[in-house]
Image (cartoon, rainbow, N blue to C red):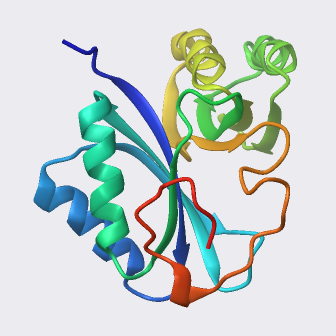
């Protein structure tokens, strides 16, 4: 029996209204849970890149990939879980701060190479970027001060080295998308 793990899936999708709703609806209907989801513009005009983190075994990932390809708006899907990749998350955290503890909070921020992006009389907002463990560690250390609010982006990831397209720039050719081979390039 395979272990249930977090899988990082990257999908290139058409940048138009309703795509996110169709993708999330597909996950809901099939009973797949998205641990986190990030969406943003890609290097190709009119295409966006979605990064999903899905829990499951290889069978779940294969089913997710096949189901995504059935959507007309999906151009390419890659499971990049086992690839050498750069994965980051951005978080903003609002922490109670006063004259007595502000310098200690600032030291923690420096240690984690984070930034204070807002200061008020009784709070500071900290911006931190890194892997999930780094962000979780900072949160654990800030918790005794009193965390008032947290916002996290979820994981974004990119394969290291040459592009997964064989080093060629991606070009959007919507007539070629929905290919059954998940490694193919449109």
Residue for point 46% across, 58% down: 181
The residue at 51%/39% (across/down) is: 150
Q: Nearer the viewer, residue 27 or 95?
A: 27
Question: In the visual, does 74 lie left or right of 135?
Answer: left
User: In the picture provided, is 28 more to the left or to the right than 7?
Assistant: left
Residue 151 at x, y percent in the picture:
53, 44
Out of 112 and 97, give the one closest to the viewer: 112
Query: Residue 92: image x %, image y %?
Result: 63, 41
Q: Quadrant of the C terminus?
A: bottom right
* Residue 117 at x, y percent in the picture: 80, 44
26 over 86 or under it: above or below: below
| In-image side of 176 versus 5 (left or right) | right
**Residue 17 found in image quarter:** bottom left
Between 176 and 108, which is closer to the camera in this rendering? 176
Rendered position, 45 above or below 22: below
The x, y position of residue 45, in whole percent, is 73, 84
Q: Nearer the viewer, residue 115 or 134?
A: 134
Q: Quadrant of residue 68?
A: bottom left
Q: Quadrant of the N terminus?
A: top left
Count of numbered marks: 0
Tell me which residue sits at (40%, 28%) in the image: 6
Q: Quadrant of residue 54?
A: top left
Name the residue rendered at 74%, 13% in the picture: 100
């Amino acid at each position: 029996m395979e272990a249930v793990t977090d899988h990082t899936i990257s999908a290139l999708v058409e940048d138009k209204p309703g795509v996110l709703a169709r993708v999330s609806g597909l996950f809901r209907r099939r009973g797949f849970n998205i641990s986190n989801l990030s969406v943003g513009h890609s290097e190709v005009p009119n295409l966006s890149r979605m990064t999903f983190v899905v829990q499951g075994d290889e069978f779940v990932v294969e089913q997710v990939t096949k189901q995504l390809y059935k959507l007309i708006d999906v151009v390419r899907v890659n499971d990049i879980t086992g690839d050498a990749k750069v994965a980051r998350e951005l978080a903003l955290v609002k922490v109670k701060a006063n004259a007595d503890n502000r310098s200690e909070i600032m030291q923690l921020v420096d240690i984690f190479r984070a930034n204070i992006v807002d200061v008020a009389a009784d709070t500071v907002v900290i911006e931190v970027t890194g892997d999930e463990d780094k962000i979780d560690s900072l949160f654990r250390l800030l918790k005794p001060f009193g965390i008032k609010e947290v916002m996290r982006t979820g994981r974004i990831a990119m394969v290291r080295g040459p592009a997964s397209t064989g080093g060629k720039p991606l070009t959007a050719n919507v007539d070629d998308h929905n290919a059954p081979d998940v490694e193919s390039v449109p």
